[in-house]
Image: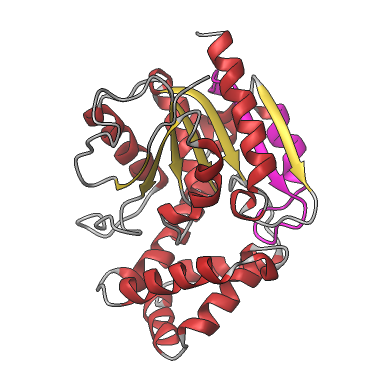
């Protein structure tokens, strides 16, 4: 039986001191949010995992409490490099890396390029290149020239409740699952971020990063990187995902060398929020297996 361990929520741009007070825990799970997200996206899942593994949720550069890149350019490679640098500075090794959406794509790149850092990899609705659903195509319009300015105007004309309603309809299979406490927490965070000068530009910048990743060919393409990953990998897909087509799940399962696949009915783009219990159970099983068969 493992003693309770801490959960930590950190921007990747600041030095990290482990919340446990000593050296980094031997088993640490690191969580990377999706496009426009922040550390709190993992709160429900971490609540189920923190008794068995040290949990470290990170804000990617430009999101949550992390400062944006100095030049404003967001790429998946830069996001992965920022996380790797953060883990190196904090002394973490062989972490259980968990990413959602854009964070999943950054986690994939990190696992392929820095296998020394990753013991297991879990990808929740990873944004792998494929013909996207209609809703995702609409989001991709943010990559067009002039979109950031237009997006900023739209945000300023829309109240927070409407913004949250639109967001939940996009990423949840059933927005009614969002509880009042979660909604209030996210409303406060969105209000805080609305006052930051870089906020309006970060969603379009993240969309452009995804488009660039989709267009990469050869050894740097996400599908080719998936073939290189040797860490045991858990893939989690919601059958009602409006942003990542469920039809990519079999191809993803075949692309990784050592894969497990969890598909969840009546679940959208953020299974760790909608269905934290089955995701936690599958992740615990993956970590337990990795403990028994160290590499």
Q: Position of residue 295 (x, y in %)?
A: 50, 8
Q: Where is residue 142 in the image (x, y as percent from the top left)?
A: 48, 70
Q: Which residue is drawn at 46% across and 34% down?
A: 109
Q: Position of residue 83 (x, y in %)?
A: 34, 38
Pick whichever, 181 or 39, lies toward us: 181
The colour scheme used to paint the residues is secondary structure
- In the rendered view, does 151 fall on the left or right side of 237? left
Pick whichever, 111 or 145, lies toward us: 111
Q: Position of residue 92 (x, y in %)?
A: 32, 25
Number of labels in the image equals: 0
**In this picture, is 71 found above or below 219?**
below
- In the rendered view, does 255 fall on the left or right side of 287? right
Quarter-wise, where is residue 175 in the image? Answer: bottom right
Pick whichever, 289 or 152, lies toward us: 289
- Can I make out residue 12 in this image? yes
Q: Residue at x 54, y 47 (%)?
A: 100
**In this picture, is 182 found above or below 166?**
above
Q: Is residue 138 magenta?
A: no
- Can I make out residue 144 in this image? no
- In the rendered view, does 73 fall on the left or right side of 261? left
**First to last magenta residue range:** 227-254
- In the rendered view, does 224 fall on the left or right side of 7? right
Q: Residue at x 22, y 58 (%)?
A: 71
Q: Is residue 239 magenta?
A: yes
């Amino acid at each position: 039986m493992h003693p309770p361990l801490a959960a930590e929520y950190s921007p990747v741009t600041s030095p990290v001191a482990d919340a446990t007070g000593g050296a980094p825990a031997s088993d640490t799970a690191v969580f990377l949010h999706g496009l426009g997200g922040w550390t709190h996206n993992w709160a429900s899942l971490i609540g189920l995992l923190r008794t068995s593994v040290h949990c470290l949720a990170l804000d990617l550069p430009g999101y949550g409490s992390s400062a944006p890149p100095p030049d404003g350019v967001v790429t998946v490679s830069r996001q992965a490099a920022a996380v790797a640098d953060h883990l190196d500075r904090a002394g973490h090794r062989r972490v259980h890396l968990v990413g959602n959406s854009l964070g999943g794509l950054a986690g994939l790149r990190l696992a392929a390029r820095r296998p020394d850092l990753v013991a297991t990899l879990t990808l929740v609705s990873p944004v792998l290149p494929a013909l996207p659903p209609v809703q995702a195509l609409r989001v991709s319009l943010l990559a067009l020239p002039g979109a950031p300015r237009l997006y900023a105007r739209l945000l300023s004309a829309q109240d927070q409740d409407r913004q949250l309603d639109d967001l939940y309809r996009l990423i949840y299979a059933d927005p009614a699952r969002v509880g009042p406490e979660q909604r209030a927490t996210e409303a406060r965070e969105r209000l805080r971020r609305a006052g930051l000068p870089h906020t309006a530009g970060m969603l379009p910048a993240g969309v452009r990063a995804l488009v660039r990743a989709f267009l990469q060919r050869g050894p740097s393409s996400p599908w080719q990187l998936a073939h290189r990953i040797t860490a045991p990998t858990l893939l989690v897909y919601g059958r009602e995902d409006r942003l990542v087509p469920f039809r990519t799940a079999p191809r993803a399962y075949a692309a990784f060398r050592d894969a497990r696949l969890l598909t969840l009915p009546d679940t959208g783009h953020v299974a760790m929020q909608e269905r934290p219990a089955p995701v936690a159970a599958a992740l615990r099983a993956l970590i337990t297996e990795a403990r028994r068969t160290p590499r």
